[in-house]
Image (tube, grey):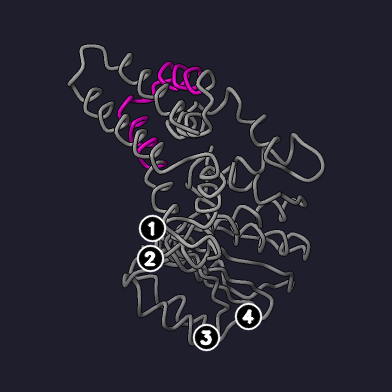
Amino acid sequence: MSLYLLLGSEAALADRALAKLQVQLREDGAEVTSLSASDVFAGDIADALAPSLFSEKRALVLRDLQDLPDETKPEITRYLADPDPSITVIFIHKGGVKGKALLDQIKKANAQIITCDALKKESEKQEFVRHLFLDLGRKATPGAVNALIGAVGTDLRELTAACSQIASDTAGVIDEAMVDKYHQGKVEMTGFDVADAALDGDVSRALLTLRNALDSGTDPVMVTSAIASALRGLAKVSGTNRGSKSFELASVLGMAPWQIDKARRQLSSWSQAGIARAVGAIALADAQVKGAAVDPIYALERAVTEIARART
């Protein structure tokens, strides 16, 4: 008997685990039946799990187990007491206490549990993307992984789709340049792009990036927020010991290790006086874009220029 329980609230992880299992089932020539627990009627599960007259390999995928009607639960209980070794059963449950009694029965039946909990740590999301590329037969550099997360965001399903597309459109090791090229003109420039250009001291690129971000619908408040966040990161990292490892400082500073490494690289061209000047400029701009200025866009452009020039 092959019995699996995909347990957790992160649908993208459950989708990925299920896809891998389905590849195995297809390779084994199994006939797969997929049911949604909320849509089943009495007898549906029993029929799907009934012994085969021809002993062919079969599989049942039962999604959203937590929504299974009470009147159909005994069909699973009876099956678990006398399973068919020719059938693979894959239960998918979003976690929580709903349907816990049935979950406990499945666990006692020695189901292989695949955890699909939401990813909270930045390192977990990076590892997720890296393995997505490996699943597609590709390798990606750490810079590419970070760039993709920065461009797409942390929604795992969107990251899955982006990885698939980039892998199909490129060849060789996936690097940061590939990710940037792929997303150029596809993903709108954000406040974080403006912040990067300003902190790099590139006035022209900072202003161009700002204009593109605003033209694509980015709220000016989001721009000031992103720049302020980047400057806070510089200030935090500037007070740490250069010999400390970034992963050791991550929990203390409330920053991801790659963010600490990035801030350290930027700090080589920033003085404490320059950081203080930039913080003052963005604080003023934040108040101005929230209503204190007649022309908030001009105020934001002026602040971005001053911040870029504050770099030593």
Of the residues shown, which amino acid type is indicated by label 2?
Leu
The label nearer to you, 3 versus 2, is 3
Q: Secondary structure under badge 1?
A: helix
Decide whether residue 239 is among the magenta residues. no
Which mark identifies residue 38? 1
Asked if 303 appears above or below 129 in the picture, the reply is: above
Tell me where residue 95 appears, x and y as whole percent.
Answer: 39, 68
Tell me where residue 104 appears, x and y as whole percent.
Answer: 41, 82
Distance from label 4 to label 2 (Cα)? Answer: 21 Å
Tell me where residue 285 appears, x and y as whole percent.
Answer: 28, 26
Which mark identifies residue 68? 2
Residue drawn at 65 percent across, 36 percent down: 179
Label 1–label 2 contact, CB within 8 A:
yes
Decide whether residue 211 is among the magenta residues. yes
Q: How crowded is mark 1: few (under 14 residues within 10 Å), some or many (20 or more)?
A: some
Of the residues shown, which amino acid type is indicated by label 3?
Ala
Between 287 and 32, the residue placed more toward the observer is 287
- Most distant residue in the left direction: 292
Q: Pointer 4: what residue?
A: 84
Residue drawn at 52 percent across, 41 percent down: 150
Image: magenta residue range: 206-230
Tell me where residue 152 appears, x and y as whole percent.
Answer: 52, 39
The label nearer to you, 4 versus 2, is 2
Of the residues shown, which amino acid type is indicated by label 1?
Ser
Between 108 and 213, the residue placed more toward the observer is 213
User: Which numbered disc flags the more N-terminal residue, 1 or 3?
Assistant: 1
Q: Pointer 3: what residue?
A: 109
Label 3–label 2 contact, CB within 8 A:
no
User: Which numbered disc flags the more N-terminal residue, 4 or 2?
Assistant: 2
